[in-house]
Image (tube, coloured by chain):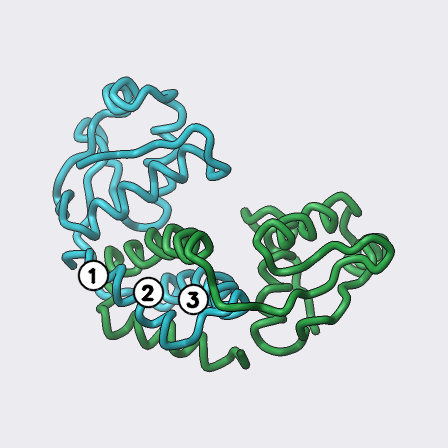
Chain colours: A cyan, B green
Amino acid sequence: MIIRIEPESEIPIYIQLTNQIIIGIAKGDLQPGDSLPSVRSFAADLGVNMHTVNKSYHELEKRGIIEIIPKSGAVIRKTLHIDRDTYNRLFEMFQPLIAEALVLGMTKEELVDLVEGIMKKMST
Amino acid sequence: MIIRIEPESEIPIYIQLTNQIIIGIAKGDLQPGDSLPSVRSFAADLGVNMHTVNKSYHELEKRGIIEIIPKSGAVIRKTLHIDRDTYNRLFEMFQPLIAEALVLGMTKEELVDLVEGIMKKMST
């Protein structure tokens, strides 16, 4: 799995890393039950600070995507059916993005096509 | 139009304000050609720093949603058909969110329903 970090981006590096890991899981490059690299080795591979990797792992844990298990490290969780709180959180995250797409002139059909196009690249 | 700012949120206040303005436009509460309040009065109304409102207006300008016109202030632009760069930027923003929804157990059908549900609330 290829992680692309753009140091020049406005998006904080730990969020870039979080996003790339989530996309990797969605594409099937990473599977539930897989371990993520140790913080130390991942940081060295990516050329980023250990603190950045650590922050990303905690973000993934908070969102229910990985478990941090003592001695085993970060493990990708098996997903269950989405709960109401998570649905609401996703709703709140999607809303401004959808609003922006429409405001910038995308039609509803184009927006559904965009979403379906992205989903087609994902295996789950 | 009601602006809700949550000072306790992890989302920076200027991004919350930016999102709320975009959602307001998408819902038709604000129309192309409408002026936004002056930085000073908006900051006072919302109980936030003038710098925060200013940063939000510059963010909206950068994304092509408003124009900042000398003397007139911030005016909502008429949208044209979306260009390739904007499409690519939206694609990059949607991708991690869609990945997360799928990874957390949402089905593709549920995700399209979520997107369509949000669009139904928007007038544009």
Q: Which of the two discs, 3 and 1, sits closer to the camera?
A: 3
Q: Are marks 3 and 1 on the same chain?
A: yes
Q: Provide the residue designation for mark 1.
A: A80
Residue type, mark 3 in image = Phe
Question: Which residue is nearer to you in this view: A106 or B27?
Answer: A106
Disc 3: host chain: A
Quarter occupied by residue A60: top left
Q: Is residue B15 above or below residue A101?
A: above
Counting from the top left corner in percent of width and height, residue B59 is at: 62, 49
Q: Estimate how packed mark 2 is, as few (under 14), some (14 to 19) or many (20 or more) residues with alpha carbons within 10 Å.
A: some
Q: Estimate how packed mark 3 is, as few (under 14), some (14 to 19) or many (20 or more) residues with alpha carbons within 10 Å.
A: some
CA distance for labels 2 and 1: 26 Å
Disc 2: host chain: A
Any mark on residue A114, and which?
2
Q: Secondary structure at mark 2?
A: helix
Q: Provide the residue designation for mark 3.
A: A91
Q: Residue at x 43, y 63 (%)?
A: A94
Q: Residue at x 30, y 50 (%)?
A: A64
Residue type, mark 1 in image = Leu
Q: Earlier in the sequence, mark 2 or mark 1?
A: 1
Disc 1: host chain: A
Q: Which of the two discs, 3 and 2, sits closer to the camera?
A: 2
Counting from the top left corner in percent of width and height, residue A1 is at: 17, 36
Is residue B8 visible in the rendered structure shown here?
no
Q: Earlier in the sequence, mark 3 or mark 1?
A: 1
Residue type, mark 2 in image = Leu
Q: Are marks 3 and 2 on the same chain?
A: yes
Any mark on residue A100, and which?
none
Q: Earlier in the sequence, mark 3 or mark 2?
A: 3
Q: Residue at x 70, y 74 (%)?
A: B1
